Image (tube, rainbow, N blue to C red):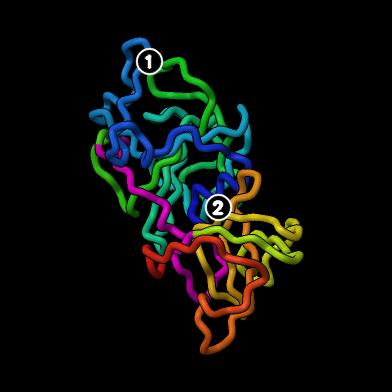
Amino acid sequence: MNPIEYLINHGFKVTSDPARYKSGIWGLRNYTVNGYNYDNYCGGYHRAYDLVKYDRAPVPAVFDGIAAPGTAGFGNFGGTVVLANKNLGIQVIYGHLARPLSISPGQHVKQGDIIGYQSNTNYQNVQMGSHLHIQFQKYGYISRERNFVCTGINPLALNVDKRRYNAAWLWSGDFTADQIINIRDFPSLAGSRIGFTGKNSKFSFNKLYDNDGYWWLRCRQQGKTVFIACGKKIPGTVFKETKLYGKLSRLNTSKGKE
């Protein structure tokens, strides 16, 4: 599970995705309202995600870390928390948080701890709607304010789920269940059950997992990422030859193994 999926599963909705800007270039947004370019400071780039839940919604830490320098009530992004994790080699900026901040520089937090509350604070008191700005960077001090504000990397390859699986493939397709199957929050028998399929339930999936003796599909249901076991993994038998708990109507294997 990447950190954006983590926030979505906590009720947040993506409103600005750097991979989907009209420019076709990751992060190049040039968001302009009434002649004001909100991205002018970074040359038109917004190398971050914007998400919303509701004003003053609690914002969870997407991974364990320590509040690093840059965590301040009055930063370039208004109320700002910078959370760093040396083991992951990543740090993350949470911006536009409500004041006063909930944590202080040097404070250790665990994944899921509340690090702040969604708000609309900013550097120049520009009118904006309440939202969460979240921006990922490689771990380490970034000198000069403009470099710090404008540096951002794609976080989608980062796995923040502490639970583990054997292997995964970036395969996609469509699956129709022909029996009742538990729906879980992780591709494991230890994952929490959050529902079940009905007969002839149809799912589109975008990842295949090998874990706990089963093949698992990663799907979307009611805006959340969920997982279903679609068949037992038999040693020596590849997925395409497995007797599944339903039927595959489409399978794209072009992206290969994770």
Residue found at the very far bottom of the displayed protein: 236
Residue lying at 51% horizontally and 24% vertically, measured from the top left? 120
Contact between marks 1 and 2 (CB within 8 A): the answer is no
Q: CA distance from mark 1 to mark 2?
A: 37 Å
- What amino acid is found at the position of numbered circle 2 in the picture? Val
Is 198 above or below relative to 80? below
The kind of secondary structure the magenta stretch mainly shows is loop
Q: Kindly identify the amino acid type of the residue bearing the numbered disc 1.
A: Val
Task: Judge whether 91 appears above or below 182 on screen.
Answer: above
The residue sitting at 55% across, 65% down in the picture is 162
Please tell me whether mark 2 sits on a helix, a strand or a loop: strand
What segment carries the magenta color? 147-172
Q: Which residue is mark 1?
A: 33
Residue linked to disc 2: 109
Residue 40 % position (x, y): 27, 24
Residue 3 x %, y %: 49, 51
Q: Of callouts 1 and 2, which one flags the residue occurring earlier in the amino acid sequence?
A: 1
**Residue 223 rendering spot, x and y as whole percentages:** 61, 44
Q: Residue furthest top?
A: 34
- Residue at 41 percent of width and 61 percent of height: 88
In front: 255, or 59?
255
| Mark 2 neighbour density, 10 Å: few (under 14) some (14–19) many (20 or more) | some
In this view, the residue in front, 132 or 174, is 174
Q: Is residue 153 magenta?
A: yes
